[in-house]
Image (cartoon, rainbow, N blue to C red):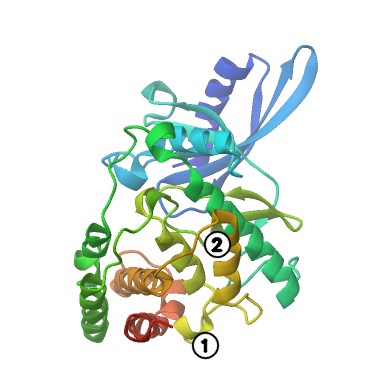
Amino acid sequence: MDLQLLQRRLQAFAIAHYGERAVVSQVETMPGHAGLSFGFRVDYQEAGQLRAESLVMRVPPKGVKQSGNTDVLRQVPLLQALKRQGVPVPTVRWFGSDLRWFEVPYIMVERLPGRTFHVWEPDPSFDRSPQAVAGLYRQAARALAQVHKLDWQKELAGWEQPRSLETEIRFWDPILAKAAEPQWVTQGQEVRDLLLQSQPANPPIGLFHGDFQGSNFLFDGNTLVALLDWEISGIGGQLLDLGWLIVFTDLKSWHPVRGPIPSVPPAEELIAAYEESMQREAQGIAWYRALAGYRFGAISGFNVMLHRKGKRIDPEWELIAPSTSVLFARAKEMLVSGI
């Protein structure tokens, strides 16, 4: 979306919602994996006082069916429910489906200070010592327990139907089939079959984040202030989140050319912090670690294909490409040995 056009539209929106003296500035494109995100500032007057508010707006691309991760309004009841639960998430400030403002539905949330913890290349301001990094991840594990404790049947009644573990596994079939290299497809299908054959009985079902890793943890100083990017959240096997967190901090799941920094906490510490907060054992976590590795292996193979064919250029995927086989091999190890 053209930023000058967007600024004009945001200006009209701000005058309607903050008053005729509202001024929009600092409009910029924000990073994100689904939809389109823009940051901006609104200066306005309230009760004779000059005030300012920084916001992030997410909208779907024009002409795209608004479903799943492109249905931005789907996040509104979710974020509101999480806020009531005390989970650190941004406050929803505005949302709507009135097309006169941006020609598409929109959601606007508060823009919080801080920086995310990209586990491959953390911001230089982070202390990378094992003790400091473990402190950050313990906060994330405790916040994950808060997410998983949400009474979704009460707080999110009718929001989404639960997704079975088999449905989760099978969802990735067509994506895996398009992987850039044939051996990745073969490896992935072997892991998929092992996952299907060994599904946990009576898995804990509830709200899951879907991409629970450092790039979605916002820290102000050393304090976790928000869990970000809820586009692919859903109702299903919750331990996928813990497995995902562990895969992104597991040195053995990645090729040395692109992997987590060495000071990330071991899986045992993350599991212990989560179990302590949940007050229950994370049973069968090796299976969920394998599911997470399989899932990201499929995602990687697909995105490398898009990059190499020029459909979605992103050189980052070439750095991740050598890890695709490693992710599948590590997932198989989890399923065969359970370690």
Disc 2 versus disc 1: distance between alpha carbons?
30 Å
The secondary structure type at the circle numbered 2 is helix
Q: Secondary structure at mark 1?
A: loop
Q: Residue 97: horizontal and vertical position, in percent? A: 38, 25
When asked about the image quadrant of residue 197, the answer is bottom left
Q: Which mark is residue 256?
A: 1
Q: Is residue 170 left or right of residue 323?
A: left
Q: Is residue 19 above or below residue 317?
A: above
Residue at the location (76% across, 56% down)? 221
> Residue sitting at 75 percent across and 65 percent down?
125
Choose between 202 and 43: the one closer to the eye.
202
Task: Give the class, few, some or many, for how many residues have Cα within 10 Å of label 1's Cα (few <14, many ≥20).
Answer: few
Q: Position of residue 207 (x, y in %)?
A: 41, 47
Task: Decide which of 126, 134 is in the foreground and name it.
Answer: 134
Q: Which residue is mark 2?
A: 275
Please state, as top left, top right, bottom left or bottom right, where the C terminus lies in the image. bottom left
**Viewer-side label of 2, 1:** 2
**Image quadrant assignment for residue 296:** bottom left
Q: Residue at x 73, y 15 (%)?
A: 46
